[in-house]
Image (cartoon, rainbow, N blue to C red):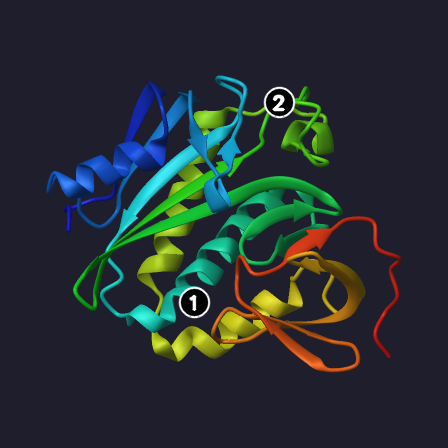
Amino acid sequence: MPDAPILTVLHRVDSTNNYAMGKVHAGLASHGMAWFAHEQTAGKGQRGKTWTSEPGMNIALSLVLEPRTLAANQQFYLSAAIALACMDFFSHYAGTATVVKWPNDLYWRDRKAGGILIENVFQGSVWKYAVVGIGININQIDFEPDLAHPVSLKQITGNEFDVELLARSLYQQVLDAASALSADAFESILSRYNRHLYKQGTLVQLKQESNAFETFLIGVNGQGQLETIDSELRKFDFGSVEWIRDAVVHKMV
């Protein structure tokens, strides 16, 4: 572990997560090291998707964490703790309409403000490293037309921000949240995650393979599964189900 947190600023890189993972595999990374890039040419999103970002306008940040206090089957709690830290960071500027969309996207109302990608390194059954990539829209106002309802901090507040300064603040919040994570905090993390969960307690439309259906979103359990109920209780692992937008919203009674 370094004597003090280390954040390195890069002008241009293909992906901050690729860069960080390269340092891990080269034996040059340790807990708390991070890289912020003003420009990514091939940013990475969840499930093989790309993360597009206008140069100099947004946060593209990757941290290396050593989850020493966690077992391999407790990965969701790290993900949830980081998602909540990102939510706290964004809501400081954007207000309480900021929520977490399962598993760890950052939403403001019904619009996507950011996302988190965690790539893990195991040595046998030992969880050695988590490379945490975070992308958050800050000053960008024009987005690719194929992106689904994006939003930036500037669009919400009308203000221009110092992106690098915000990245340093976010870095510290995420590092503090990860470093404080222990089994004693799991219950409170899960409870808070569900309180701020996008569409919690409402009717949503989901699709599993070719089957589309409506179901009430209950919340997320300790294994990181999405739980819903309709004619039966359902549990979904990440990647096994897709969201369909624009469902009719009804509160669960």
Residue pictured at 34% horizontal, 37% vertical: 17
Q: Residue at x 18, y 37 (%)?
A: 23
Q: Is residue 138 left or right of residue 159?
A: left
Q: Is residue 91 left or right of residue 21?
A: right
Q: Which residue is mark 1?
A: 77
User: Badge 1, how many Cα within 10 Å: few under 14, some, many 20+?
Assistant: many
Indicate the quadrant where residue 70 lies: bottom left
Image location (x, y in percent) of residue 163? 49, 26
Question: Quick check: 9 left or right of 85?
Answer: left
Residue type at tag 1: Tyr
Res. 34 mark: none
Q: Residue furthest left?
A: 27
Q: Nearer the viewer, residue 140 or 164?
A: 140
In which quarter of the view is residue 92 placed? Answer: top right
Callout 2 secondary element: loop
Q: Is residue 63 visible?
A: yes
Location of the C terminus (image quadrant): bottom right
Please provide percent x and percent y for residue 5. 25, 43
Residue type, label 2: Gln
Instruction: Tell me: residue 249, above or below residue 140.
Output: below
Foreground of the two, 43 or 10: 43
At which x and y percent is residue 24? 18, 43
Residue 235, placed above or below residue 52:
below
Question: Considering only vertical position in the picture, is 221 above or below 82?
Answer: below
Percent of width and height locating residue 222: 49, 76
Quick one: which residue is furthest to the front in this view? Answer: 210
Mark 2 sits on what residue? 140
Q: Residue at x 66, y 23 (%)?
A: 143
